[in-house]
Image: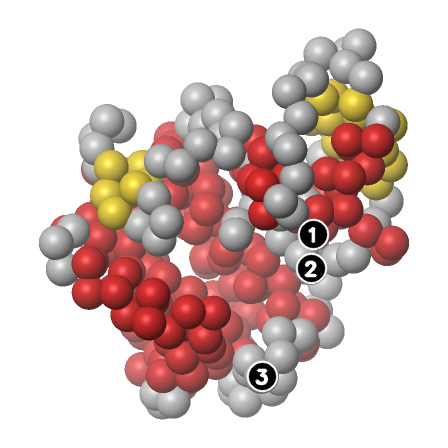
Amino acid sequence: MRDYGLDISGMRRDLALPDLVAEGEALDALVSAEPDWSKPTPAEGWTIAHQIAHLAAADANVLLAIRTPEAFDTVLKRADAEGAERADIEAAAGAAQPRAALLNQWRTGRTEVAAALRDLPTDKSFPWFGSDMTADLAIPLRLMETWAHGQDIFDTLGVPHVPTTRLRFIAELGVIGRGLSFYAAQLPIPTAPFRIELTAPDGTPWVWGPTDAPQQIHGTAHDFCLLVTHRKPLTAATLTAVGTDAQTWLENARVYL
């Protein structure tokens, strides 16, 4: 796996997998009760159907990469050819299906993905976009995507997306993705330690790094997760930075390229 200063040693698939399943079920309850999937979401050009189609396509790609990795090479070649438009093309194709068929595809796919990732050996990797992937990283990434695209749908329907402790793994991705954020901004990756102190939805503290680190981030876990998934701008987030590198990180925070 390409190294952006990414340390996933603390990821626990046995804890993250139930959260992935629960997040999918929460979003399912919302969209299955909504008859009009043609409503536009905050993602430009994407309706509710596009959002669900994107999640379903990602699940299908995970299953293909795990079950027949040699066939996934075709997906990678197509992605190279389509470039930045790949996600739009996939989402549009899925959204063109009847609502019932797309809902069934997404339900079946996410169930099979959960089982496949649960059973994948810890030392077994599978091909993915840009680098190989392991189940220990894929599970929280699928959780992050489900939550983030779900946020778009919750916002579209005007329904509060109540934060839960499932944000823990998304926040963890944001924390370990610090190097990725600097890499994407074409900036040197800081080597000095950082301290991150976030308040969880239940009021408990989530902390990473030494207490005396010169670079620090403070705020709510909810806003941190919204920021790193690009669902809320820094100017609207309840986050503060201590130190120049910490501020630069927040200005460029992300969990995916």
Whether residue 230 is situated above or below residue 250 in the rendered picture: below
Tell me whether circle 3 and circle 2 mark residues in contact (CB < 8 Å).
Answer: no
Tags 2 and 1 touching, CB below 8 Å: yes
Distance (Cα) linking label 3 and label 2: 16 Å
The residue singled out by tag 3 in the image is: 45
Secondary structure state at the residue bearing disc 1? helix
Residue 135, percent across and down?
32, 38
- Way the structure is coloured: secondary structure
Mark number, residue 140: none
Q: Of marks 3 and 2, which one's residue comes earlier in the chain? A: 3
- Residue at image coords 36%, 62%: 58
Horizontal arrangement in the rendering, residue 79 relative to residue 223 (left or right): left
Badge 3 element = loop
- Name the amino acid type tagged 3: Gly
Residue 188: image quadrant is: top right
Which residue corresponds to mark 1?
226
